[in-house]
Image: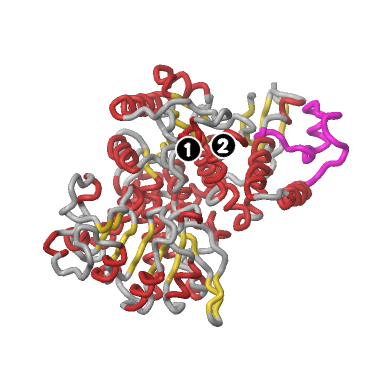
Amino acid sequence: MDFRIQIDPATQQRYIATSARGRALLINPFTNKGSAYTAEERGALGLHGLLPAATCAIEQQLDRCYENFQAAGTNLAKFIYLGSLQDRNETLFYRLLHQHIEEMMPFVYTPVVGEACQRYSHIYRRARGLYISYNQRHRMTELLGNFALDDPSIMVVTDGERILGLGDQGAGGLGICIGKLVLYTLCAGVSPYTTIPICLDVGTDNDERLNDPLYLGLRQRRVRGEPYQDFVDGFVAAVKEVYPRVLLQWEDLLKANALKQLTRFRNELCTFNDDIQGTAAVALAGIYAALRITGQRLRDQRIVNAGAGASAQGICDLCVSALVEDGLGEPEARRRIWTVDSHGLVTRARQNLEDFKVAYARSTDELAGYKCRDRSAITLEDTVLNARPTILLGNSATPGLFTESIIKLMAGHNAHPIIFPMSNPDSKCECKPADALAWSGGRAIVASGSPFAPVRYADRTIRIGQCNNVFIFPGVGLGIWAGHCCRVTDAMFLDSAKALAALVAESDLKSGSVYPQLTRIREISHAIACTVIRRAVAEGHAEPSMAQNVEERVAQAMWFPEYMPIRYEA
């Protein structure tokens, strides 16, 4: 349907110009205002008789929507209600989320989005986004063009193989892309008119999905190896042809694929991987803020990362950059980091060590001095005992991995151990924040990947900061788009981490949280976007003029969910 955002030359007011009338306006989520159409609009747009008599302000509509949200009986029912509202009325959907952001964020993203991806083929209501299956690999340019956006801002792309900590969800992985783009709009004001969620459907190895008669995806085993890479290469080539200015965000690929695609394409177009780079930046920001409590320098930290996948790799690499910036040489910075995977501490003695694990593998000489039962399989507890880390990060998707004995070891050699069980959804969390606090005698500085309620310990109520990528990636995407940047670099994420840490208020730290209140998210995204643009200009990835009046430039680029007047213009 034809509609355009225009500016009235006389009043400078924005309005929607459309050549459509009647029911066509009501079934389009971008032009539907429901009962909020004015009497004048109803007459001019042919809406009389199609709506109840009452004209409602958006505040009344919000009361009605919130009542319906609360009436939904389960978490999944609340997710479905919100999705249906988004399908009907984008403005009202985002205004409702904006008004209840802390309460509703878990229902449009983690943890509930994980269940929604698992149930995707059973709760499917309406087409949203773009599905490109392996069988359509010779038609990618056509399929991208079918989405019919003139100049999209951001596309989030997955192949559905590693959805959160839940594994292969096939075509159901599109739910994660939809959720991420909701957060771009909600948290950073990226216009929902300009975004594209995409599933690259190459099949699934999830037998539950393949045996489900309602499964909506390509019903075959996953395409792998060279055919898979040819498919991805063809997709990227089509993106460069059809949408050359778009920011392409990779989402929830298998760890080796995630690292490979980022390396392969980062110098060809504007692209990044939130699981690798966004997770790294938000984790580092939490560490920076925690050091304001401990009074220590980053260069003095020792970090154990429980997990050695793509997210852990990103965290380790960004921490090395930060340690080097704080005065260490790169070899010494790498020696401050230990990685532990499902087989134990990653060491150079291990056979067939994956390339991306080599950089942080520990030497055999070092292991000779370790106190442990079996040097061929050094456990996480062994690692904490011998490395004596100040920081313990969890990216393992292994619930209960941070045991009482491990937490007590951390507390035994740190006045305030920094412990971030970051895996999500909450069913995959390495430990519950309440347990980390109880086992450390209330001294741990804790942040989690999923949202947790405040913890009461002794005479304190401790707010659990969420180590949530939403504090980083929406602002990065906004900055890339508003600044017309042509590349995304690691330095942008390092700067973003520092910008986020600087926005953690003293009141946050006193409450026990190393992250700001979510209610400040648009302020945070604005600051990060400005930081990204300044870094892009410094690195030559944006025009120098983009740094001029950058705060105003970013503010003007941020969409806010409010109804605009609609005019019929043939």
Expressed as whole percent of the image width and height from the top left, the position of residue 186 reads: 57, 48
- Please report contact status of discs 1 and 2: CB closer than 8 Å, yes or no: yes
Which color scheme is applied? secondary structure
Task: Calculate the distance from the C-alpha at mark 1 to the C-alpha at mark 2.
Answer: 9 Å
Q: Which SS class for mark 1?
A: loop
Expressed as whole percent of the image width and height from the top left, the position of residue 418 reads: 38, 69
Is 191 placed left or right of 430 in the picture? right
Numbered mark located on residue 120 in the image: 2
Q: Is residue 570 above or below residue 156?
A: above
Numbered mark located on residue 395 in the image: none
Q: Quadrant of the N terminus?
A: top right
Q: Nearer the viewer, residue 12 or 390?
A: 390
Q: Residue furthest right?
A: 53
Q: Earlier in the sequence, mark 1 or mark 2?
A: 2
Q: Which SS class for mark 2?
A: helix
Task: Work out whether residue 540 can be spotted.
Answer: yes
State which region is magenta: 29-58
| Main SS, magenta residues | loop
Expressed as whole percent of the image width and height from the top left, the position of residue 110 reads: 53, 51
- Name the residue beneath numbered marker 1: 169
Q: Nearer the viewer, residue 15 or 221?
A: 221
Is 335 placed left or right of 244 in the picture? left
Q: Is residue 59 above or below residue 294?
A: above
Residue 43 in the magenta stretch? The answer is: yes
- Circle 2 packing at 10 Å, graded few (<14), some (14-19), many (20+), is many
Quarter of the image where one finds residue 20: top right
| Residue depicted at x 54% and y 62% | 452
Disc 1 residue type (three-letter): Gln
Residue 454 in the magenta stretch? The answer is: no
